Image (cartoon, helix red, strand yellow):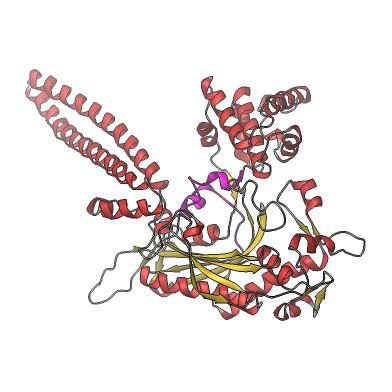
Amino acid sequence: MFDLRAIRDNPEAFRVAWERKKVGLGAAVNDILAHADALRQAVTDKQEAEAARNAKSKLIGQAKASGDDALFEKLRAEVSAAKETIETAGEQEAAAQTLLDDVLMGLPNLPLADVPEGADEDANVQQGNGWGDPKTFAFKPKDHADLGADLKNSIGQPLMDFEAAAAMSGARFVALRGNLAKLERALAAFMLDTQTEKNGYEEVSPPLLVRDNALEGTGQLPKFEEDLFSGIFGLSPVAEFANNERRNEAMFQYVWSVLQSVANVDSEVSEMTVQSAQTRVNLEDYVPREFAGDPIYKSGFEQDALSRLIGFRGIHPRNAEAMWSDHYVGKGTTSLDRARANITERSWLIPTAEVPLTNLVREQILNDDQLPLRMTAHTPCFRSEAGSAGRDTKGMIRLHQFNKVEMVSIVRDETEGLKELERMTRCAEGILEALNLPYRRMLLCTGDMGAGARKTFDLEVWLPSQDTYREISSCSYCGDFQARRMDARWRPPVSEDNPKPKPQFVHTLNGSGLAVGRTLVAVLENYQNEDGSITVPDVLQPYMGGLKVVS
């Protein structure tokens, strides 16, 4: 997470850096030092007590053999007291370690000195004059959602269908058909080919489901859980949980899981959103084993749960989760944390391929000749968009599920990392330039940067319908922030000056190369024609079988 010795040696530097990130955050240094001191004292007390116990345990036998009963009893009492001290100090050590870890795991990375200070996107700084001139149209340009809806297949269905997607999955989903689906695939293939054949990235096909420790490693957990799609997806630990807990525990977990499923898709609890979520949460996984074959019990269990869920009607599902947890905590039966702790094999849908790609080096020591390591992947990404209520509700700009080509680099140190950040950003810019899409580069301020980044460049593409630039790529240098959480290291080469080099933490970078859905949006809007057709960019025509116009 962070180097405790460095924080002890220069607490003011950390205090200033975190304060630049967010006003008031610098005070966390005091908590870190207090917990670290408590941890050190507990460890010292335990070690001293263990030494005393060991020394006096040897003397007990001698006192017994010599017949000195008084000394024997005295030593035995002292050993007993030492054992109690060891136990107490051990508990204090565990408590201090937990408090320290909780603080450190929740803190963001330290912004570099050249990152502008600011609270939000208004303080971001444009780099240079941008690339390309926004196209002028002889007609009023439409937005991508209207363009996609007006394009039809041979039986009159829209090639960009939000209604059909919403009927099966809820808001913020889309179904693409025909040549729009093919155009999206063409974009992804073009991006992958460019990043692998031209830019030297190795293509990877990674898992889309990951465990907690993978997301902790890259920094999404524990602080940003609400932004993720989490679930059990029918894995055996849920069944074990349901089989081994009493009805009230099973009911608690089932209702909580349904509320979480609602939160992943909708912004309000209603009878419709609850019933939709119940189709995604397998009831069989929560019914206690002794009632697994009893249809009457299962029906009653489901109806009981439904009545409880409908009681949260009109409430945001995240608030309902908290209320449900507090309800059971008040009864002394369980808590949200305990319920989650009982499920040791939770899985999460990846919010970005950054997570699995970066974790490919977790708990490894790489050789010097393996670096720099560059990887890319085209994957679906899943995000709850918990903090985006009311924003970009129309179209494909902000979806729960979208496709992205991700780039990840593993390098040796900060010097190499900053050079790699420029290289990675240029790799993303090259895609936009090949597509002839006007864009600009922005240096993000401290408050707008992601929690894991030390420095970030955003690329923003021109959207004619909005008469503005919108983010299409974000490239970040993370230093050793992720590596410390993953225990990912590299070993410098042996030299005369360093015959036994010690492993050091690697430095990591990640960036979009590019977000495929948003690139499709930009292509549709910038390449639209007055009749509503879309001219296919030259570089994509080979991927479209020579097709020049989507109409």
**Coordinates of residue 431 in the picture (x, y in percent):** 61, 75
**Coordinates of residue 247 in the picture (x, y in percent):** 63, 23
Residue at (21% x, 35% y) in the render: 45
Name the quadrant containing residue 326. top right
Q: Is residue 284 above or below residue 182?
A: above
- Residue furthest to the right in view is 155
Residue at (52% x, 21% y) in the render: 330
Query: Is residue 513 visible in the rendered structure shown here?
Result: no
| Nearer to us in this view, 20 or 233 | 20
- In which quadrant is the C terminus drawn? bottom right
**Coordinates of residue 491 in the picture (x, y in percent):** 35, 68
Name the quadrant containing residue 55. top left
**Coordinates of residue 250 in the picture (x, y in percent):** 62, 28
| Nearer to us in this view, 404 or 339 | 404
Query: Is residue 111 visible in the rendered structure shown here?
Result: yes
Membership of 218 in magenta stretch: yes
Which region is colored magenta?
205-232
Q: Is residue 515 above or below residue 333?
A: below
Q: How many marks?
A: 0
| Nearer to us in this view, 445 or 273 | 445
Left or right of residue 262, residue 224 in this image: left
Membership of 485 in magenta stretch: no
Name the quadrant containing residue 130. bottom right
